[in-house]
Amino acid sequence: MSEIAINKLPVPTWTWLKVNEYTVAVPDKFEKAEGLVDTMPDEVKVGKVDFTSVCLGDVELGAGEEFRRISHAAKTGGASYTVPAGVKVKEPIRITYDLGAGDDETGKLSRTAIVLGEDSELTVVLTFKGCPKFGANDIRIKAAKTAKLTLVEIFDFEDGANFVDSIGGRYLEKGGLKLIQIKNGKGSVALSCCADLDGYKSTLDIDTGYLVTGEDKLDINYVARHRGAKTDTKISVSGVLRDKADKTFRGTIDFIKGCKTATGDEREDVLLMDEGVHNNTVPLILCAEEDVEGAHGASIGKISEDILTYFASRGIPEAEVTELMAKSRIDAVAGRIPDDKTRELLLADE
């Protein structure tokens, strides 16, 4: 095992705050995480992953360079999904990764490349389960002009799991990514996404919901690099912390010189259910271009006494109120999943 630093804040703040990065212990060996394909539309060309041949080697990963080196050295293979120009795929790709129990010496790694031709559309739904001692997911995306990708990731691990999810992508003129991530299981999870908004009016839209319990950790790092004019980023993160849970959210909107009239907004809503939880929220806006508009905000707190009193007057005990409030965060994000089958399964589980 060796330790690597991931999810680094692009511009470090005071070290004593302990929010600049997240350290994880990584095994020396990896094996390929096998996914069970539920649906694979005929319009999608499936191949072996080769980040060099599909021109994805220059994509910046949200988890950072140390994770990139680990992923490349693992040589576990993977899959690439390519959509030809002009093809709007109606049926989503649905894949479930059951990572099993795992062990301390061998990690599980999935590697995926998604390449969208001009004016194409695709939805991908990935579900991760099991209890890996260390599991990881490496996704790299390139979207041509006016190409749109919706990526839904659901993390439903068992107690003791440790998982790293890293996404990187480049988006040309009017191309974009809609990312929906839901963590509603056990285990410690690190989520990350870096988007290079290279083209005019390219977009990044992230919607994340989470529930963290016990002594589990959730570490989130989202980075939007605005390079094209009139690019737009929206980041919305909402979740609940219980017991002795530990969560850090880093959201960076980077306005690079030349991205005139670009806009960015990031918001987080955190509900603290118990005294033992630990929360860090680190919104960051970097600006090298004058003609831009960026905003950030956070709402962090407990359930108000007024709400508890209101429900109590209707015969609903406090314990039940807290459960309802916690589930509502996940339900709200799940309700925005565009795939009916996935959305209904999640809402039914709630």
Image (cartoon, grey):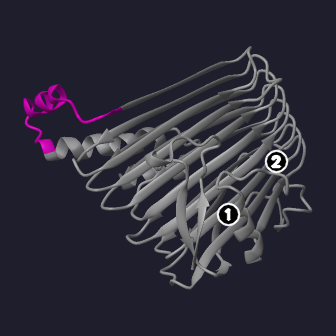
Tell me the quarter of the image containing the N terminus.
bottom right
Residue 68 place in picture, x, y as percent: 73, 63
Q: For the magenta stretch, what is the residue range?
A: 300-318
Mark 1 in CB contact with mark 2 (< 8 angstroms): no
Q: Name the residue under label 1.
A: 67
- Secondary structure found at label 1: helix
The kind of residue tagged 1 is Phe
- Quarter of the image holding residue 257? top right
Label 1 – label 2 distance at C-alpha: 19 Å
Any part of residue 76 in sight: no
Give left or right: position of 95 versus 176. Answer: left
Residue sitting at x 41%, y 50%? 247
Q: Mark number for residue 330?
A: none
Find the residue positioned furthest to the top.
291
Q: Name the residue under label 2.
A: 142
- Secondary structure found at label 2: strand
Question: Residue 275 colored magenta?
Answer: no
Residue sitting at x 77%, y 77%? 75
Any part of residue 255 in sight: yes
Give left or right: position of 133 versus 111. Answer: left
**Crowd around label 1: few <14 · some 14–19 · many ≥20 (10 Å):** many
Residue sitting at x 59%, y 53%? 7
- The mark nearer the N terminus, 1 or 2, is 1
Viewer-side residue, 139 vs 311: 139
Looking at the picture, does residue 146 appear above or below residue 96?
above
Give left or right: position of 329 versus 75. Answer: left
